[in-house]
Image (spheres, rainbow, N blue to C red):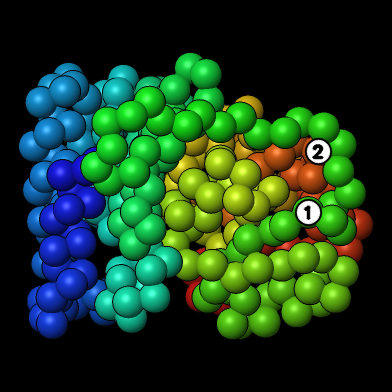
């Protein structure tokens, strides 16, 4: 993660990030490609038995569906934020076993912090220190939802999807979804909510962090969990974080008859 972070920061500091556009008009930069190359080489060396699912790599979903373990990677989640240089982007890595994120790491290069899941919580590393990392577990005590800090997609915020909720709740727009999940896992926010569908590479690493921290992961509409199988499918919107406010938000969502969006970008 440090090696990929340094590769991204090198491009971030340059005047020419090498922006190109994929078929769906989504931007990709030299940083996406370089980080993807670093991660594919290093992670495949760690677990050569695991499949590889990355936003920036060719993929055979039928072959991946036969794998017990899959590396699920977004070399830069929030490429537009990277291009805009607002700092709200991340590098996300998850190891998924039979549809469940069992290990994850998310780097926030602009800070720089790297969050990594473990058996006793989430470890927070900086870019260079070899000191024992700080470890985080979420507070599971009761808290009023209206006093909870909730981070949401800046895109969804700009579309006005939270304008009514903001009158009652403490809503804070942020960039990359992997970054939001990482911030929740270390208690910078109490929970995060998204109403748009997500790709596996957006969320696998962050979901593993939230689980390691003792958080709860549900769909805000049904209250049910989120399974990452079969690989590569779009997942519904989510609500993750401290268990008590997450369940309160689910009740809030249902009581007001709110709906998830079935496709990205819909209002």
| Location of the C terminus (image quadrant) | bottom right
| Identity of the residue drawn at 63% across and 38% down | 217
Image position, residue 36 (x, y; %): 16, 50
Figure quadrant of the N terminus:
top left
Residue 141's quadrant in the figure?
top right
Residue for badge 1? 148
Residue 72 in percent (x, y) is at: 31, 40
How packed is label 1: few (under 14 Cα within 10 Å), some, or many (20 or more)? some
Q: Is residue 234 visible?
A: no
> Which element carries disc 1, helix, strand or loop?
loop
| Residue drawn at (28%, 37%) of the image | 129
Q: Mark 1 or mark 2, which is nearer to you? A: 1
Residue 173 against residue 38 in the figure, above or below: below
Regarding residue 253, the answer to whether it shows in the image is yes
Task: Give me the residue at 89% from left, 49% from top.
Answer: 144
> Do the residues under discs 1 and 2 have CB atoms within 8 angstroms?
no
N-term-proximal mark, 1 vs 2 = 1
Q: Is residue 61 left or right of residue 244?
A: left
Say which residue label 2 marks.
244
Residue 224 lies, in percent from the top left, at 69, 37
Q: Residue at x 14, y 63 (%)?
A: 10
Residue 41 in the image: above or below residue 158:
above
Count of marks, rendered view: 2
């Amino acid at each position: 993660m440090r090696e990929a972070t340094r590769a991204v920061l090198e491009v971030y500091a340059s005047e020419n990030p090498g922006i190109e556009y994929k078929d769906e008009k989504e931007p990709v930069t030299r940083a996406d490609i370089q980080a993807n190359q670093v991660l594919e080489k290093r992670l495949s060396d760690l677990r050569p038995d695991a499949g590889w699912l990355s936003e920036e790599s060719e993929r055979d979903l039928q072959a991946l569906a036969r794998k017990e373990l899959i590396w699920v990677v977004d070399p830069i989640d929030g490429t537009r934020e990277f291009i805009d240089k607002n700092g709200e982007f991340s590098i996300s890595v998850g190891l998924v076993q039979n549809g469940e994120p069992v290990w994850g790491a998310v780097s926030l290069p602009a800070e720089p912090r790297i969050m990594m899941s473990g058996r006793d919580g989430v470890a927070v590393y900086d870019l260079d220190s070899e000191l024992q990392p700080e470890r985080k577990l979420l507070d599971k005590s009761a808290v009023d939802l209206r006093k909870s800090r909730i981070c949401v997609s800046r895109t969804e915020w700009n579309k006005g999807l939270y304008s009514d909720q903001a009158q009652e709740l403490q809503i804070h727009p942020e960039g990359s979804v992997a970054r939001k999940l990482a911030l929740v896992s270390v208690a910078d926010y109490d929970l995060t909510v998204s109403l748009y569908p997500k790709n596996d590479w957006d969320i696998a690493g962050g979901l593993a962090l939230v689980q390691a921290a003792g958080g709860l992961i549900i769909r805000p509409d049904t209250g049910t969990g989120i399974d990452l199988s079969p690989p590569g499918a779009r997942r519904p919107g989510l609500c993750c974080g401290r268990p008590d406010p997450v369940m309160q938000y689910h009740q809030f969502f249902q009581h007001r008859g709110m709906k998830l969006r079935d496709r990205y970008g819909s209002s």
